[in-house]
Structures are given as C-alpha cells and as structure tokens.
Image (tube, rainbow, N blue to C red):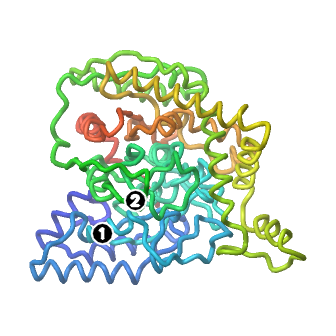
Amino acid sequence: MDITGSTTGQLLKAMQSGSVSAVDVTQAYLDEISADGETIGAFLTVNSEGALAVATEVDRKRSRGEPLGRLAGLPVAVKDNICTKGLATTCASRMLENFVPPYDAHVTTQLLNADAVIIGKANLDEFAMGSSTENSALKVTRNPWDTDCTPGGSSGGSAAAVAARLAPLGVGSDTGGSIRQPASFCGVVGLKPTYGRVSRYGLIAFASSLDQIGSFATDVTGAALLLETLAGHDNRDSTSVDRPVPNYSATLEQPLTGLRVGVVSEFFGEGIDADVDTSVKAAIDVYRSLGAEVSEVSLPHTKYAVATYYLIACSEASSNLARYDGVHYGHRAEQFENMIDMYAASRAEGFGAEVKRRIMLGVFALSEGYSDQYYLKSLKVRRLIRNDFDLVFENVDVLAGPTCPTPAFRIGELVDDPLKMYLSDICTISANLAGIPGVSIPAGFSSDGLPIGMQLLAAPFEEETLLRAARMYERETDWHRKRPSLG
C-alpha cells in the first residue's frame, strides 16, 4: 500500500482492516519528513517520539477492541500558533521561540480525543501575519509544486505538508484567507468554518474577531472529517457558538438538488491572472453541467474589504500583542537601562518587520483623534459587507469565484511590496469580515504548472451545504488527485 499517497478515508479503512497499523502509517510519514529534509521546510518541530507513542497506543486499543476516535492513527500537522502542551509553540517568532505551553488548545484536545497523531508543528508567517510564510522568523517554507515559489500564508507550513504528503491532514488558522489562499497555492482543500464554529481557546491571537481555525486535506472528505473533530462548543471561548455539529461525512456524497450558484462579479476583472480566470470559469461550467442554476451576483462593498480588514486586524493585533512586553513571558532583551527601555528593546528584538508594521498601523488607527475616522468607520463598513452577503444568500446557496487572483508567486517577489502582498487576499478577506464559511478546492493548473483554487462561500453555519457543493465538483474532476513531483 502506498501509505503517503492514500487519502484519509483509505488510510482509515486500511488501519481498521489490519492491513497496516497506526505505527506503520506514522512511520511512513515521518520517513517522508526525514527524506524531505528542508526541501519544503514545512515543519518547525517534528514530534517523532510523541507521534509514535500515540500511534502505538492506538494500535494497542484496536487490538483489544477498545473504542477509538474518528481520526484514530491519522497523522496531523498543526500550525505552530496553536498551543500543544509540552510541545514548542513559537508562532514562528523570536518572541516565542522557546515557549512551551503548559496546556493544550481546545482543538488540540479534540484531536487527541479523536486518537489523531500530532506529527509536528507547521511553519507560518510570524504571528500569522502574512500571505507567503516568508515572514517566519525561523525558516523558509517552499511550495511543493515549485520550490522557487511560496506556499502562501499564513498557514503555509500546514498546506505544504499536506500537498507534499508529509501529513494527510493539517490544521491552520484563517484571519483573512490564511487557510484558503495557501490551499489554492498548494493544490489542496482548505476549509475556513463559520466564526464561532470552532473554539479559539489556545489559538495565539492575531485579530480576535476574525481568527478561525480550520482544516487542510487532499480531498473534501478529509476536510469534512477533520471539521467534525474540531467543531463544537467550548465555554472557555466566549465567541464559541453552542449549536450541534452536523455529521458532515454522512451527507457528503448526497448531491444538492436545485443548487443555486452565485458567481461574484467583483472577484473577476482587473488583476485576475488569465489562467485563473479560465480555470475558475471552467470549474463553474461543471456546476452548470450538473444542473445547477448559475447566476452572476454582486457584493458591492467588496472594494472596501482590504482597507477595512487591515484597519480592524491591525487594531486588534496591536492590542493582542501588547502582552509581549519582556516581563510575563517570551523574549526579554539582555541589554537595557530601565523598564521602558526593556519593553522597547524586547519588542524591537522579538518582533519581525511585518509584525511591527501591523502593530504600528493598529496603534495609529486606535489613537486619540483617529479612532473615529479609521477604526470605528471600518466597523461600520464591515457591517455593510456582511449585509451584502445576507442579501445575496437569500437567492443563492453558494458563491463561487477564484480563491486568489494569481497562482503562487516566487519567493522574494512581493516581500518588498507589502501593499501588493496584501492584495493577494482580496478574494478571501470578505468572508472573515462577514464571519461566513469558505473553502478552496483544486480547480486546475496554470501554464507554469502551478495549482489554481476555486473558492466556494456559504451562509453562516452552512458548512454542510458548502462541503456537499465542493464534493459535487470534486467527483467530476481529478485535480485533487494530482501530486507534486519532488524528485
């Protein structure tokens, strides 16, 4: 059996039948990680000993006929801004380079309760601030399809790990597209749930009203299975919504009768790469061929989304990151003259350039005399963006468009042009501002052989509809079966 070439469903069946063990599966992926070395560089920490210990326990339970969780024996790459007790959680920052959490995040507990194997902590843009994983202070992660290109960000490590078959599943966080954009760049499925569907307890905060944890997989089935595990109410997170979690896997193979697909006109046009335009429109034609009703719709306030997002996100970041002062935990400068100098020196040394840029933007937007002009106005525009979605979803079931305006760009290409980098999230940001679920699914390749993703969006808590619609397309195509050649 080609373990690392198998889907999550195939791996689960093989382990249940006894043809392979959880230890076999875990060791196969650890061998792939070892063979990769730093070609891809997806992981900041590889949890070899801990992963094999959990896999051994899963095999022991199975041999005794004891109950097992839904992910029993499946390795998972966890983004390194999610707390894992006893395992370093760095946020890819010098500020937290030596931080080992004394507790697990809610989603970490959910994974362990499901008998998943946490195989390692995946690289990211520092504090999840970026769209290329180039802002990591600790290492560079490369795109498995072309190692001269970025894997996207900020969850680039998780996406690259799944694409390179270094793990069958990945967990990431999405604040403005940080799951969907790297999923598009790496040719995998990336799902951002509705805000509040998954607890943020133990997720190191970037922008608290936008952050949401979600899943990566090679196919929609894997993403659905992982969401079932992560989702659910948690009273430690005041924004966690107390409502039942559907059995997404049970209905996944049921096509949606009378599906209404809205094509967002604002997601096409100036700035959209020709290959992306062609591939996504061809993908939408697949829905037409399946009998879906396809119509063009408008989200008129989309043009304000990038500005609105960066005002809100940076404002919240400046507040959330104030805790890293060199006193409580994290990096402390060795040379300073007084307490104020210690704060300044510690933060100057511990934070990278992009994090500093966003903190300063946020401090300015919240400063006296400017907060009404910038921050409060951005909250009002956010409401208008949500209203656009509410109106559109009265007439359609899902929205479709490109996940990103371009395929993956080269490492270093946009690093000195932050505005252009910010615009790479133009198609994904609105969903975070509105709090709605979205998924990126493989939908083709560019003329250079780079993956292209199609984004589907649905109304709040309509993940079941979203996943069924994604699976309808996936059944008709084989883009998700393609694997990068890593030599």
327 and 309: which is toward the camera: 327
Dot 2 lies on which element?
strand
466 and 240: which is toward the camera: 240
Image check: 446 left or right of 207? left
Dot 1 lies on which element?
loop
Against 295, residue 97 (above or below) is below
Residue 64, given in percent of the width and then of the height, sits at 10, 82
Seen at 59% across and 24% down, the residue is 303
Earlier in the chain: of badge 2 and badge 1, it is: 1
Q: Estimate the spatial distance between the alpha carbons at disc 2 and disc 1, rounded to whole Å.
A: 11 Å
421 and 278: which is toward the camera: 421
Residue 198, given in percent of the width and then of the height, sits at 37, 53
Q: Specify whether residue 188 is in view.
A: no
Residue 439, given in percent of the width and then of the height, sits at 38, 41
Q: Which residue is mark 1?
A: 116
Residue 340, given in percent of the width and then of the height, sits at 84, 68
Residue 93 placement: quadrant: bottom right
Q: Are marks 2 and 1 in contact (CB under 8 Å)?
A: no
Q: Which residue is mark 2?
A: 170
Q: Which mark is residue 192?
A: none
